[in-house]
């Protein structure tokens, strides 16, 4: 199986001109699009508008209904781009008929799996029932991609809103943590959800949205069954300024460097996924910040994303970084979770 990521710019929340062009030029077969993550501008209405734009376009090419597109292809829209964040979307593409790169049979390359829980009842959202459903969905996605558990690098989740999103995000992150053997299921109770911050995943990023009725899951890692030209690495920034942690996360992707990335190495980066936690604590390295106390406190998550985008972007020379804000069992409080997908050979998809 050949797995690829393709990153495209957006001039507005419904701008899919790059995707339409690539489909019309036969560079992308719409049947091979398995998931989409977008960093959209605007609020939940803009996210919904973007989702609808993808449904309309892909239903035309796939000859299925808008509803079937939504059910078949996880679409994770992450809104509110602050600072220098550039709106864009990332296509997850897999093709079992394309050979990909020639490699040793034991060599591992980038792979992903997608899955969804059943539709959640309102009373299940933010509970241990959601934890168990998400855990099963993550395990299914790992199995689909034929990734060994130790080779999982990143889990991206979009879940229903529920109580402002916080408990739903927390339950989703804990479900992934259980599936990845980062947390024992026996340690978790209803009271643990969004309370016991010693329980977390260092590989999971969760976003919530009113448009979701089930939990949608994308698991990324490296597999010997993949013939992709890409590879994924991951790591943890202990805080928003931890460049050493960022460097180690990039090194884990195969771009070995000691001080800074060369221009050639920067060009190999296909996408970086960052879960931002700066707003989880009132300070950074003992210095107070005002994300939760200033006039913009209602937008603390946007500020955290803008900081992460600027710090990581300045290091890799890119503003199209997928940044999601959330501290609900997603890494140690105040940390950034980083996953980097790079091209190790073949044509760059960018």
Image: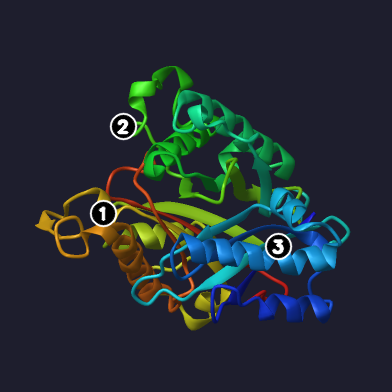
Query: Which quadrant is the N terminus positioned in?
Result: bottom right
Q: Is residue 85 left or right of residue 124?
A: left
As drawn, 313 above or below 287: below
Image disc number at residue 185:
none
Q: Secondary structure at mark 2?
A: loop
Q: Which residue is mark 2?
A: 198
- Is tag 1's residue or tag 2's residue first in the polypeptide sequence? 2
Image x and y of residue 221, in percent: 61, 49
- At a point 73% along the width and 66% down the height, the residue shown is 56
Q: Which residue is mark 3?
A: 55
Image x and y of residue 257, in percent: 44, 68
Q: Answer few, some or many: residues within 10 Å of disc 1's Cα (few below 14, many 20 plus, some between 14 and 19).
A: many
- Is tag 3's residue or tag 2's residue first in the polypeptide sequence? 3
In this view, the residue in front, 111 or 210, is: 210
Nearest to the eye among marks 1 and 2: give it. 1
Q: Answer few, some or many: residues within 10 Å of disc 2's Cα (few below 14, many 20 plus, some between 14 and 19).
A: few
Image x and y of residue 125, in percent: 48, 33
Measured in 3D between alpha carbons, the distance from the residue under mark 1 to the one under mark 2, in whole angstroms, is 17 Å
As drawn, 255 above or below 133: below
Nearest to the eye among marks 3 and 2: give it. 3
- At a point 31% along the width and 32% down the height, the residue shown is 198
As drawn, 55 above or below 14: above
Q: Which residue is mark 1?
A: 279
Q: Pointer 1 and pointer 3: residues touching (CB < 8 Å)?
A: no
């Amino acid at each position: 199986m050949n797995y690829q990521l393709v990153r495209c710019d957006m001039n507005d929340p419904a701008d899919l001109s790059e995707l339409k062009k690539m489909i019309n030029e036969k560079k992308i077969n719409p049947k091979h699009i398995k998931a989409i993550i977008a960093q959209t501008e605007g609020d939940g209405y803009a996210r919904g508008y973007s989702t609808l734009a993808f449904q309309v376009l892909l239903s035309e090419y796939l000859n299925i209904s808008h509803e079937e597109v939504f059910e078949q292809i996880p679409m994770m829209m992450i809104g509110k781009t602050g600072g220098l964040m550039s709106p864009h979307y990332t296509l997850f593409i897999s093709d079992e008929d394309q050979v990909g790169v020639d490699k040793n049979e034991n060599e591992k390359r980038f792979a992903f799996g997608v899955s969804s829980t059943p539709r959640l009842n309102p009373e299940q959202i933010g509970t241990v029932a959601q934890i168990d459903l998400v855990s099963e969905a993550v395990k299914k996605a790992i199995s689909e991609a034929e990734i060994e558990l130790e080779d999982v690098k990143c889990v991206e989740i979009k879940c229903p809103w529920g109580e402002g999103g916080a408990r739903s995000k927390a339950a989703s992150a804990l479900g992934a943590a259980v599936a990845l053997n980062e947390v024992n299921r026996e340690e978790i109770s209803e009271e643990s959800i969004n309370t016991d911050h010693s329980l977390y995943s260092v590989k999971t990023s969760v976003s919530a949205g009113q448009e979701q009725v089930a939990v949608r899951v994308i698991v990324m890692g490296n597999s010997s069954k993949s013939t992709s030209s890409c590879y994924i690495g991951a790591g943890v920034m202990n805080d928003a300024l931890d460049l050493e942690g960022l460097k180690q996360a990039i090194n884990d992707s195969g771009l070995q460097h000691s001080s800074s990335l060369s221009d050639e190495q920067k060009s190999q980066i296909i996408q970086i996924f960052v879960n931002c936690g700066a707003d989880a604590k009132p300070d950074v390295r003992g210095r107070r910040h005002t994300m939760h106390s200033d006039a913009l406190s209602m937008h603390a998550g946007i500020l955290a994303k803008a900081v992460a985008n600027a710090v990581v972007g300045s290091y890799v020379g890119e503003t199209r970084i997928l940044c999601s804000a959330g501290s609900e069992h997603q890494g140690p409080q105040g940390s950034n979770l980083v996953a980097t997908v790079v091209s190790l050979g073949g044509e760059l998809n960018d």
